Image (cartoon, helix red, strand yellow):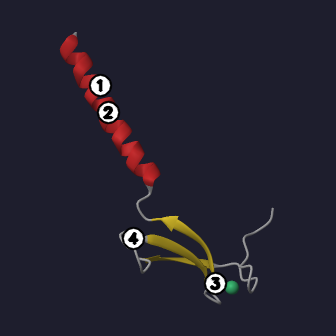
Amino acid sequence: MASAACPKCGHEFFEMREYEPIGPPSRYEIMFVFCAKCGATVGTVDCSNVGSIVNEIREKLEDIEHKIDYLIK
Ligand SMILES: [Zn+2]
């Protein structure tokens, strides 16, 4: 199985750090994945983690649905 490696230096360890990009729109914060040795950015991740937010909303909607079902019966 291949392992992840920095495209610049070949190092195989990475770090993540949150940055707010300059310039409009600057309200987005992004997690940068970068090489722990040379600092080359190899990827970004949205800090808002949309997937977990959608999952929380789904769970709340299911709770509301169950409460409505209980009231109707
Ligand atoms: Zn590197």
> In the image, residue 64 lies at what x, y percent?
26, 29
| Residue 56 sits in quarter | top left
Q: Is residue 55 above or below residue 18?
A: above
Q: Alpha-carbon neighbours of circle 4 within 10 Å: few (<14), some, or many (≥20)?
A: few
Name the residue located 44 percent from the left edge and 53 percent from the top edge. 50
Whole-number angstrom distance, CA of label 4 to CA of label 3: 24 Å
> In the image, residue 9 lies at what x, y percent?
74, 87
Q: Alpha-carbon neighbours of circle 3 within 10 Å: few (<14), some, or many (≥20)?
A: some
| In this picture, residue 44 sits left or right of residue 4 | left
- Spot the residue most to the bottom: 38
Q: Are marks 4 and 3 in contact (CB under 8 Å)?
A: no
In the rendered image, the quadrant that contains the C terminus is: top left
Q: Is residue 73 above or below residue 41?
A: above
Provide the residue designation for mark 4: 25
Provide the residue designation for mark 3: 40
Looking at mark 3, is its residue's CB closer than 8 Å to ligand 1?
yes
Provide the residue designation for mark 1: 65
| Residue 70 sits in quarter | top left
Q: Nearer the viewer, mark 4 or mark 2?
A: 4
Whole-number angstrom distance, CA of label 1 to CA of label 3: 47 Å
Q: Amino acid at mark 4?
A: Pro
Q: Alpha-carbon neighbours of circle 1 within 10 Å: few (<14), some, or many (≥20)?
A: few
